[in-house]
Amino acid sequence: MQEFLVEITTTIPDGTSQDEVDRRRAAEAVRARELAAIGHLARLWRPVGELRSVGVWCAADEAELHEKVLGTLPLSPWMSFTVTPLEPHPNDPGR
């Protein structure tokens, strides 16, 4: 699978009830664990003080990433994604 750096910004629509936000966030946590267990979510961070996340995600290609991975997140209708395909760097100390 190919790795992708994905920046995700979530914008909750005005007028959305707190119950709906809480329900989707709980479902999001469950789905993230599922995606991690099957190898699609490698790492995830939240920049301090921000309502966005940055992660390393894996998929066969960018189309699969959007359709079968990111598109399955319960919060995806409220999310915008910036996707950068990654490749190994010859000086990567983790290689």
Image (cartoon, rainbow, N blue to C red):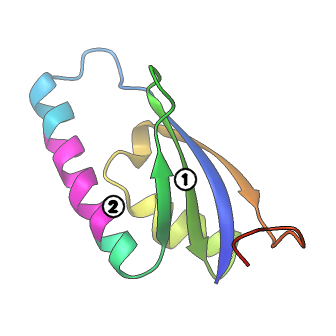
Image depth: mark 2 or mark 1 in front? 1
State the residue lying farthest toward the right. Answer: 90
Which percent across, then down, holds residue 31? 28, 63
Disc 2 marks a residue whose amino acid type is Ala
Give the residue at the far front of this rendering.
93
Judge whether 14 appears above or below 69 on screen. above
Residue 1 in picture, x, y percent from top left: 64, 84
Residue placed under numbered mark 1 in the picture:
55
Q: In this view, does 36 lie above or below 27?
A: below
Taking depth in this image into account, of 44 and 35 the one nearest to the observer is 44
Query: Which three-letter amino acid code belongs to the residue tagged 1?
Result: Gly
Front-lying residue, 72 or 28: 28
Span of residues in magenta? 23-33
> How far apart are the two marked residues, 2 and 1, measured between alpha carbons?
11 Å
Which numbered dot is residue 32? 2
Indicate the position of residue 6 as horizontal and vertical percent values: 62, 51
Residue lying at 47% horizontally and 25% vertically, measured from the top left? 48
Secondary structure beneath dot 1 equals strand
Side (left or right) of 64 relative to 11: right
Q: Which residue lies furthest to the left in this view?
A: 19
61 displayed left or right of 11? right
Label 2 packing within 10 angstroms: few (<14), some (14-19), many (20+): some
* Front one among 20 and 92: 92
